[in-house]
Image (cartoon, rainbow, N blue to C red):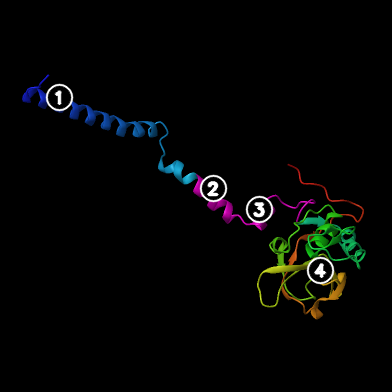
Amino acid sequence: MTLTRPFRLSVLGLTALFCAATAQAQKALPQAVKSRTPVTATSAKKPALARIRAAAKGPVESIESHGSNPRGPFARLTEVQRDSIVENSRSLLGIKYKWAGATPERGLDCSGLVQYVFAKLGIDLPHHAADLAKLGSSVAKDTSEMQVGDLLVFSKLQSKRISHVGIYVGDGMMVHASVGGKGVMETPVLEYRSALLRGVRRVISVDTAMTPTSTPQPPHP
């Protein structure tokens, strides 16, 4: 059948109109779907604000917000309990060094030694020298200012990254797990030349109001 020219133009016009309508509908569909879950400026900012606030609240502030905690840094101890840190530390002298070691039976590394000694007093410390360097309060790098139980943090001579930690046991001495086959040993702080003393951290405090036989109680929830 032969279509007349006006009729062919009408068919072409209808076809073009149909295609345009279909394209318009497809374009509008995603917009309609998006409109079901509108994203406001306020809702978009919430995750970002949460991340910023979490980053701003450092590890020390986070722990301090929970107050003194017998199971963590900033524990309150009696003088007797604090002095037992010396006994616990020296009881490990001669234990072999083992990287990532956390028990005397398998060997200890520097932060494993710290974690093990403090755990005996119910104080849970991280097994990582760099994390230990962020805890507690800063103390002058002076043996006349240091107290038993203070943590001494070190870096390699040509680096600022904390890579070693020891426990101050008084009289200018520290106990630490030394790499190189020496194991747990007691060393004069001022004569330790294998690393650079970067800081001293105090993660416990002595509560003189407590009797020597009393034990620290967990804070009320």
The nearer-to-camera label among 2 and 1 is 1
Task: Indicate the quadrant containing the N terminus: top left, top right, bottom left or bottom right.
Answer: top left
x%, y% of residue 86?
Answer: 89, 65
The residue at which mark 2 appears reads as 50
Residue 208 appears anywhere in the view: no
Task: Indicate the quadrant containing the C terminus: top left, top right, bottom left or bottom right.
Answer: top right
The residue at which mark 1 appears reads as 11
State which quadrant residue 99 falls in: bottom right
Horizontal side of residue 159 vs 184, given as left or right: left
The nearer-to-camera label among 3 and 2 is 2
Name the residue type under label 1: Val
Name the residue type under label 4: Gln
- Whichever of labels 2 and 4 marks the residue nearer the N terminus, that label is 2
The nearer-to-camera label among 1 and 3 is 1
- Whichever of labels 2 and 1 marks the residue nearer the N terminus, that label is 1
Instruction: Report crowding for label 3: few under 14, some 14 to 19, many 20 or more residues within 10 A (C-alpha).
Output: few
Residue 117 appears anywhere in the view: yes
The residue at which mark 4 appears reads as 147
Whether residue 179 is situated above or below residue 10 in the rendered picture = below
Under tag 2, what secondary structure?
helix
The residue at which mark 3 appears reads as 62
Q: Residue at x 73, y 62 (%)?
A: 132
Name the residue type under label 2: Ala
